[in-house]
Image: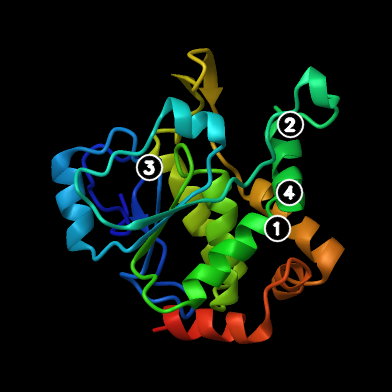
Amino acid sequence: MTDAFIDIPGVRNFRDAGGIGALRRGVLYRSGSFHTLTEEGARRLKGLGLRTVFDLRSAFELEAWPDQRHGLDHETLSLPTLPPHPTPEDGGDRPWPEDQSALYPFMAESAGPSLAAVVRRLAAPGSLAAVVHCAVGKDRTGLTIAVLQSLLDASEAEITADFLLSNLGLGLDEGPVPYLDETGSERLSRPVGAELLASSLGWIEDHHGSVPGYLRHHGVTDPELDALRTNLAA
């Protein structure tokens, strides 16, 4: 295991997203959800100075697996990366892709409002330390953290290496692992590969020219981008 991983009892795949590019350590973390967080885990999070949690899960996931707090007083922002699953009543024409290779460009297409809100909050005073999490901290969290790291001048190789650490953090380094989803159905959690993240970032570049251009399209201002860099930089 790399020294980026931090043992937070009851939280999977918890690690420091900093130490690459200009992003300093100790201000931005990434993980799976807090729905099985223990009291000891909460004490350790408090010791990290946790002030903000960005929860990228769907409303259904939040209802099925609510985060535990154990007295922690951080702010939680619910910012779903993906749109709600469509139902027959609303046409049902844009379900979440099941295939990973299709999911990643779809995430880039749909995540703009969520990512813009993350950037705005991290640009504001008093937001740090912060944690970004989804269900297991692999896909939705992976894209969000990659965007933030790119804004802090991390290289593509550094961003990809950090992204791939989720395979270690989730025990996926030897292949897919079965799990029960929020509906109680058995599914397979699959390892991530470099090509997946590249497809998300490639979609952003193809449609908006750059990560800052993508965020500007979703309402983020240049002063906010500058403030985020100031807050997170070493």
Q: Secondary structure at mark 4?
A: helix
Asked if disc 4 and disc 1 are in contact, CB closer than 8 Å, the reply is: yes
Label 3 or label 1, whichever comes before in sequence order: 1
What residue is pinned by disc 1?
A: 112
Taking the image as drawn, is residue 157 in sight? no
Q: Residue at x 62, y 50 (%)?
A: 194
Taking the image as drawn, is residue 105 in sight? yes
Give the amino acid at mark 2: Pro
Give the amino acid at mark 4: Ser
**How far across and down, in percent of the image, does residue 9 sit?**
21, 40
Estimate the spatial distance between the alpha carbons at disc 3 and disc 2, rounded to whole Å: 24 Å
Give the amino acid at mark 1: Gly
What residue is pinned by disc 3?
A: 169
Q: Nearer the viewer, mark 3 or mark 2?
A: 2
Q: Secondary structure at mark 3?
A: helix
Mark sitting on residue 110: 4
What residue is pinned by disc 2?
A: 97
